[in-house]
Image (cartoon, helix red, strand yellow):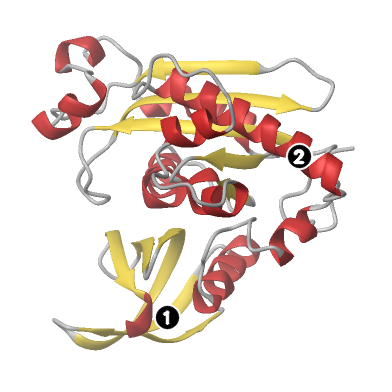
Amino acid sequence: MVFHPDDLDFDLFEAKYAALDIETTGVSFRNDRICEIAIVTWRVGEKTEEFSSLVNPGLSISEMSYSVHGITNSMVTHSPTFREIADKVYEMLKDSVIIGHNVLSVDLSFLNKELREAGKKPLYNFFIDTYLMSKKIVPGLKRRSLKCLAQALDIKVDTLHRALPDAQLVMKIWRKILDRFRREGITRLKDMREMGLLDGKVKKKAKDIMELARIHGLVRIVYLSPFSGRTMRNIEPLSVRGNKLDAYCHLREDFRTFELNRIIDYRIP
């Protein structure tokens, strides 16, 4: 069977999973780019498939980001651009449930921005954020870092803060969790949704907008901007971060971040 990204009744033990991790030049969705990406795919009963690559972002890596991942400008100078690896990335992710640790905070927004820049459609797959579900999986967990969650599940931790080791660790964590789900009779994506484990704490408005985007591509919003007042915009939603929606705005012809509580209406254009 082939997993379809909108099928909540799909069997957890038949789905294809893709652990995703990216490293970036900085933390600004609008101004920064991916400088490393790794994907680890797996389906029950099959071997994992791995892909990782440094990425030439076309701009300098900030000192703050370098202090986290250790990737230098010279390391990415002769690496492929994201456009050059976009086909491979898209093929590995398109029919998968995407898994990541804090995947909502950075990964999905940056990924869909890069895909759009490369001429690809954004991915609106179901996702599993191991950070958001960590306290329900390990009650009493004091710190929700990737390392702490892995150790709480008795998983050995080696190198961290580079894309491939982090993606590999995320997949090990998910496989451990899936074993527990099997024992507890949790068998379908809708079971995870009912438990609040499937797509994090995404607000209803954000879910509605992302669903419209998945079906129609464009969404028309009425936005109450603190700078330009009430405006009507056609946007291509890319991802949700808490109370913020990252998107490509056709009115401004640029990437923008919208506050959900300032979106006063949304519909099909």
Which is nearer the eye, 202 or 86?
A: 202
Which is nearer the eye, 186 or 223?
A: 186
Q: Position of residue 234 (x, y in %)?
A: 41, 73
Numbered tag placed on residue 209 in the rendering:
none
- Dividing the picture into quadrants, the one containing residue 190 is bottom right
Q: Position of residue 143 (x, y in %)?
A: 39, 44
Say which residue appears at 19% left-offset and 46% top-offset. Answer: 31
Q: Earlier in the sequence, mark 2 or mark 1?
A: 2
Q: Nearer the viewer, mark 2 or mark 1?
A: 2
Compared with residue 81, is residue 47 higher up or lower down, i.e. above or below?
A: above
Decide: few, some or many residues near mark 1? Use Cα within 10 Å; few <14, some 14-19, many ≥20: many
Compared with residue 132, is residue 163 higher up or lower down, i.e. above or below?
A: above
Q: Which residue has dot 1 on it?
A: 221
Q: Is residue 2 left or right of residue 20?
A: right
Say which residue appears at 16% left-offset and 84% top-offset. Answer: 228
Q: Secondary structure at mark 1?
A: strand
Whether residue 55 is visible here, answered yes or no, is yes
Q: Secondary structure at mark 2?
A: helix
Q: Mark 1: which amino acid?
A: Ile
Mark 2 vs mark 1, CA separation in Å: 42 Å
Check if mark 2's residue and mark 1's residue have beta carbons within 8 Å. no
Whether residue 58 is visible here, answered yes or no, is no
Q: Residue furthest left?
A: 63
Numbered tag placed on residue 180 in the rendering:
2
Q: Mark 2: which amino acid?
A: Arg
Q: Position of residue 240 (x, y in %)?
A: 44, 61
Compared with residue 62, is residue 182 higher up or lower down, i.e. above or below?
A: below
